[in-house]
Image (cartoon, rainbow, N blue to C red):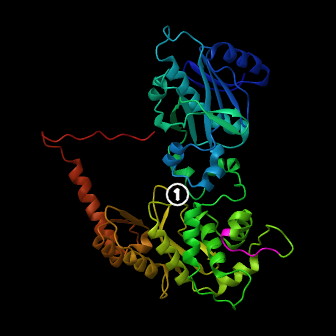
Amino acid sequence: MAVAASRGELTVEVVAAADCAWFDAQLAERHYLGAGRPVGDYLRQVVRVRGAPAALLVWGPSCYALKDRDRWLGWSATQRVERLKLVVQNRRFLVLADQHAAPNLASQTLAAALRALPAHWQQSFGYRPLLAESFTDPEAYEGTCYKACNWEAVGSSAGYSRHRADFYVANERPKRLWLFALDPRARAHLRAAEVPGECRPGVVAPPSGVLPVAQPQLLSLFEVLQKAPDPRAKNTRFRIGAVLTLVALALLAGRRDLAAIVRFATTLRPPQRRLLGLPLRTGTRGFYEVPGYGVFYAVLGRLDHTAFAALLSDWLLAHAGTLPQALSMDGKMIRDHLGLLTLAQHEDGAPQAVAVYDQKEGTPRCEQVVATALLEKIPALDGKLITADALHCQKANARAVVEKGGEYLFHVKGNQPSLLAQAQVLDAAAAALDARPAPPFLSRRPAVAAE
């Protein structure tokens, strides 16, 4: 055994190569599913109690697509493909000792293994996972030890079993799906614009043709952007609707600069290129060309960026609530002096509206002015909380949010000394009120210190 992590009487170890035969023999003999076959990144753990083996666990690749898991995470198709390796699956869990002789042994050993898993996985494969998943058969097990370890039951599998390498058959026995966050902010990290540095080696480039929207939404977006005026000469090879749709899709997929937009366009498959009306290369059958760097540069250099942002923003508002989860685009630059301001959901980064600006402040199209116009354009903000940094802590923005039924939380800094002083006075008064003894008829929840 090697790579140990201990906590009191429990010691968690990664099984060394020399001990894999013993480990697999135990699973083959005593686990109702057998030992299984190693695939992908595959980790064996043994939990010892006072030196004696008490539990065996196997961790491996997660399922490619789970509707309930992906909905819980708020992933887009692109994010799922890129970050799937950051989710690991508990494939086997076998308690060796007599559970009646040691109460709560299953939950204790599982909890110990989970605490050690991120470091074990990073040491073995070079990246740190963020989420664990597992399944239980509700007809045979209640999943009590998972509940005791704070796993969350989020749904079930579709009830299919692998029959061949690429073929599944219905087994009419869907399994309960459990998820466990290996990091306090795992859910936010997995759908953020970027994952933490120690997780990035586990992020993979998506294969060709993975789009941030479904085909009906792709066609709808293409139809809208076809109406944009073309700033170039007429009779161009690549029509404006196709070029702008590629730009919009790339931005929704998290691409941040012109080179990344060009690379994204090259990943489209022939049927997707055909839907956008891209030209067929002369002398070929089914090879549709995509615009090169020069085409995108020419279009974005001459484009009416405000009109483009308005078209895209209207489309996003029209499809609010129906789009797959998308990445936030706030603060990204398309070109050196073109800023893209985004109003995006906090939980999943899905954009709600976008606008363009040229500078942070001081111009007619600066970020401050554009932000106020963007808030005023949104028809309603009922039940929504709008947060912003100190740049947007302005009366006009606060008024626009409140008048549309929303609430705001703006950052106050020293650039507005009077407002900052008022906020500090209010904060001190609130703290003094909170320190007074509570009346007998009021109960207060004790403060919980974060570990």
Measuring from the top left, give residue 146's x and y in whole percent.
49, 28
The answer to which of 236 and 258 lies nearer the viewer is 236
Residue furthest to the right in view is: 283
Residue placed under numbered mark 1 in the picture: 325
Three-letter amino acid code of the residue under disc 1: Gln
User: To which quarter of the image does residue 218 belong?
Assistant: bottom right
**Residue 285 seen anywhere in this rendered image of the structure:** yes
Horizontal relation, residue 395 to residue 91: left or right: left
Horizontal relation, residue 347 to residue 198: left or right: left
Magenta residues (range): 275-281
User: To which quarter of the image does residue 10 belong?
Assistant: top right
The answer to which of 245 and 87 lies nearer the viewer is 245
For image coordinates 62% across by 39% down, the residue present is 63
Measuring from the top left, give residue 68's x and y in whole percent.
50, 43
**Residue 195 seen anywhere in this rendered image of the structure:** no
Whether residue 164 appears in magenta in the rendering, the answer is no
Quarter holding the N terminus is top right
Measuring from the top left, give residue 94's x and y in whole percent.
60, 19
For image coordinates 58% across by 69% down, the residue present is 219
Measuring from the top left, give residue 4's x and y in whole percent.
66, 26
> Above or below — where is 327 with respect to 98?
below
Whether residue 280 appears in magenta in the rendering, the answer is yes
